[in-house]
Image (spheres, rainbow, N blue to C red):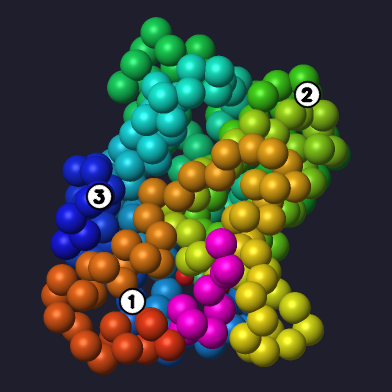
């Protein structure tokens, strides 16, 4: 197990393996990259696993908030669909951790289809207008999904102050010749730079490689190392 991980990250990594949310093999990604591993947050549907994941999100946010008291937000926004349970359950966990600090925060999410009757619109939960928003999502690879969520925040008049994901694959932004070996910035690094906000990940590819090393899984390790060399960002 990765020696330097805080206890809540280590326990989340163990649960990723137990839930088979972290799989090794051959997978085609949304970005069309062929990956030797895949992280499937959707497999954290069982109550004990969901708690493990949302505790890890909540502790990651709290750890940053404790070390940077100026970091404050009003709404945890979970982009549809995968972000919806994450936003609601993580907010509940934050309130468990510190009711005085997090008890009055809200969650919200978008509908994929705009509603033209009843309350209308396509935001459910707290309005984003004029609020400080943290986006919660599952994975960042090339950054496409997260940029779509950022567009929603902008459209709704919210102020983006941070992003948290369960897993950062540490991959560079795509280009026309994706595998030409040119060093390029990471998808997360680009978002950090462009918006000047913190982007947190509970686990990264480096944590998984470290974990495989501790297990002595030579074949998986070799394939992950090759993939990392091909797509890893330069920062
Ligand atoms: P990007 O939009 O390229 O950043 O990819 C992020 C999305 O890819 C996630 O929201 C997932 O739907 C999916 N994904 C995973 O869930 N796990 C992975 O390990 C890799 C991907 C992916 O397709 O890149």
Q: Relative to residue 2, is residue 185 drawn left or right? A: right
Q: Residue 119 location, x and y as percent?
A: 77, 27
| Distance between the alpha carbons at the discs numbered 2 and 1 | 39 Å
Q: Is mark 3 within 8 Å of ligand 1?
A: no
**Residues in magenta, as a range:** 227-235
| Callout 1 secondary element | strand
Q: Earlier in the sequence, mark 3 or mark 1?
A: 3
Identify the residue shown where x is 38% and y is 83%.
225
Please determine whether, in this image, residue 205 is positioned above or below residue 220. Answer: above
Residue at the far top: name it: 100
Q: Earlier in the sequence, mark 2 or mark 1?
A: 1
| Callout 3 secondary element | loop
Q: Residues within 10 Å of mark 2 (few under 14, many from 20)?
A: some
Q: Residue 179 location, x and y as percent?
A: 64, 88
Circle 1 residue: 23
Residue 235: mark: none
Q: Is residue 229 magenta?
A: yes
Q: Nearer the viewer, mark 3 or mark 2?
A: 3
Identify the residue shown where x is 57% and y is 69%.
233
Identify the residue shown where x is 68% and y is 56%.
190
Circle 2 residue: 129
| Distance between the alpha carbons at the discs numbered 3 and 1 | 20 Å
Please determine whether, in this image, residue 217 is positioned above or below residue 234. Answer: below
| Distance between the alpha carbons at the discs numbered 3 and 2 | 37 Å
| Whether residue 48 can be seen here | no
């Amino acid at each position: 197990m990765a020696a330097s991980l805080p206890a809540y990250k280590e326990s989340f990594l163990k649960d990723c393996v137990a839930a088979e949310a972290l799989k090794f093999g051959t997978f085609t990604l949304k970005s069309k990259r062929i990956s030797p591993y895949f992280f499937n947050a959707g497999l954290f549907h069982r109550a004990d696993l969901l708690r493990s994941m949302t505790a890890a999100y909540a502790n990651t946010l709290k750890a940053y908030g404790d070390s940077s008291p100026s970091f404050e937000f009003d709404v945890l926004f979970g982009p549809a669909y995968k972000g919806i349970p994450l936003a609601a359950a993580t907010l509940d966990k934050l309130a468990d951790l510190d009711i005085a600090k997090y008890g009055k925060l809200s969650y919200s999410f978008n509908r994929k289809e705009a509603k033209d009757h009843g309350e209308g619109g396509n935001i459910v939960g707290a309005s984003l207008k004029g609020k400080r928003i943290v986006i919660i999502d599952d994975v960042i690879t090339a950054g496409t999904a997260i940029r779509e969520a950022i567009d929603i925040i902008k459209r709704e008049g919210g102020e983006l102050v941070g992003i948290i994901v369960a897993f950062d694959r540490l991959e560079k932004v795509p280009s026309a010749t994706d595998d030409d070996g040119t060093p390029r910035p990471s998808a997360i690094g680009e978002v950090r730079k462009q918006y000047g906000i913190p982007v947190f990940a509970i686990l990264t590819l480096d944590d998984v490689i470290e974990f495989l090393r501790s297990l002595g899984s030579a074949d998986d390790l070799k394939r992950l190392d090759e993939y990392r060399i091909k797509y890893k960002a330069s920062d």
